[in-house]
Image: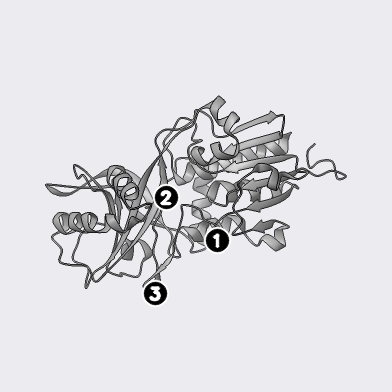
Amino acid sequence: MTPSDPHHPLSVVVVGAGLSGAACARTLVDGGARVRLVERGRAPGGRMASPEVHGRRVDLGPGFVTSKDDEFGALLRDWERRGLATPWVDGTEVLGPDGLTRKEGPVRWAAPGGLRSLVRDVLGDPVAAGLHVDLGAPVDDLREVRGDADAVVLAMPDPQAARLAPDLLAEIGVVENDPTVAVATGWPERTWDLRCAFVNDDPDVVFVADDGSRRGDGAPVLVAHSSPQLAARVLAEADGDPLGAVPPVVAALRRLLDLGEPEWTHAMRWGMAKPQGTHETTYHLSSTDGGTIGLAGDQWAGGGTPRVESAWRSGVDLARALLAG
C-alpha cells in the first residue's frame, strides 16, 4: 500500500539515524508516508559524529565528503549556499616516510558546524515534517518496533543488521566492517602543512586531518584515524576501551610531522568504522514472513567505494522504492 491511498498511507519504521537513515526517513515523509525514526544514540548522525571536545566541535567520523553523484552534488552546493558545507581540499594529500606529497583528486568538502550538522539538515524539523523520532532507544528485536508498520528499514552496518534480521543477512551475505580509533589531539600551535592526508606505510595511523583547517577556525587540532590492526588489538585487549590507541597514534603523529607533545588528547572508538567491501546495489528490499524489510547504509554503494555520499544515495533510493510500492 503506497501513500497514494489517503486512507492507508505507507507506514515505515526506520532503525538508525545516521545519514542513510535520515535520508530515507525524510524522503519517505516528503512522499506522504508515516515514519518513525528510531536511534539508539542520544543524537542523530551515526558515524558522522562531531562531539564537543575542549570547547569546540571536532569531526571524529569521516574525514570529509566527496561527490560523484549529480543529485548529491546538487545537495552539496545547496549546503554551500546556506553556509553548511564548504569546499576544503582540492586533490589528495599523502603522508609517508618521505614527507607530504600532493596529487590530483576529487574536491573534499567539510562542514563548519561538523558533519553531524549535515545529517540534522537532512532531517530538518521533525515536528514540522510530521516525523516521529525516538532517540536513546536501542532495538534488540524487530518485534519491539514493527507494530503495524508496513515496512522496517535497517539503516546500519551489516553486522548490526544481522543481529536483528539474521536469516535475511545470511541469505544476502554480510559485508564486514573494519574498526578504527579516532584520536583528536590539541597542540600549542599549528606547525604542519597538511590539511587532510592519507598515511602510507605506517602500522598505526592511516589518515590525519587538520581539524582547524577543516572547521575554518584555525585551531591547532589534529584528528588521526588508527589503522584497523591497531584498533582491533587495542579494543580486544582493553575490553573496548580506546585509550590504549592514544600513545602509538600520538607517537606516529610526532614522528611523521616532527611535533612535540600534545596539550590534550581525546579518543573515540568505532567498532564498525568502514565497510570492507560493498554490495552491488544501493539498497535491499524484500518481503519475509515477518513483513517487508529494507536495508541501507554506506555499504550499499552499488559496487563502488563506501562513502558519505553512498550512505545518502542508499537511503534515498530505498525510500523511493518503498514509495513506488
Residue 190 in percent (x, y) is at: 22, 68
Residue at the disc numbered 2: 65
- Point out the tag, 2 or 1, that comes first from the N-terminus: 1
Residue at the disc numbered 1: 43
Describe the element under mark 1 as helix, strand or loop.
loop
Instruction: Indicate left or right for 78 with 60 as reference.
Output: right
Instruction: Indicate left or right for 247 with 17 as reference.
Output: left
Describe the element under mark 2 as helix, strand or loop.
loop
Residue at the disc numbered 3: 55
Which amino acid type is shown beneath numbered disc 2?
Val
Q: Residues within 10 Å of mark 1 (few under 14, many from 20)?
A: some
Which amino acid type is shown beneath numbered disc 3?
Gly
Residue 310, above or below 49: above
Which mark lies nearer to you, 2 or 1? 1
Residue 311 in percent (x, y) is at: 51, 43
Which amino acid type is shown beneath numbered disc 1?
Ala
Residue at 61% x, 59% y: name it: 135
Residue 13 in percent (x, y) is at: 68, 46
Residue 12, above or below 213: above
Q: Is residue 209 visible?
A: no
Q: Residues within 10 Å of mark 3 (few under 14, many from 20)?
A: few
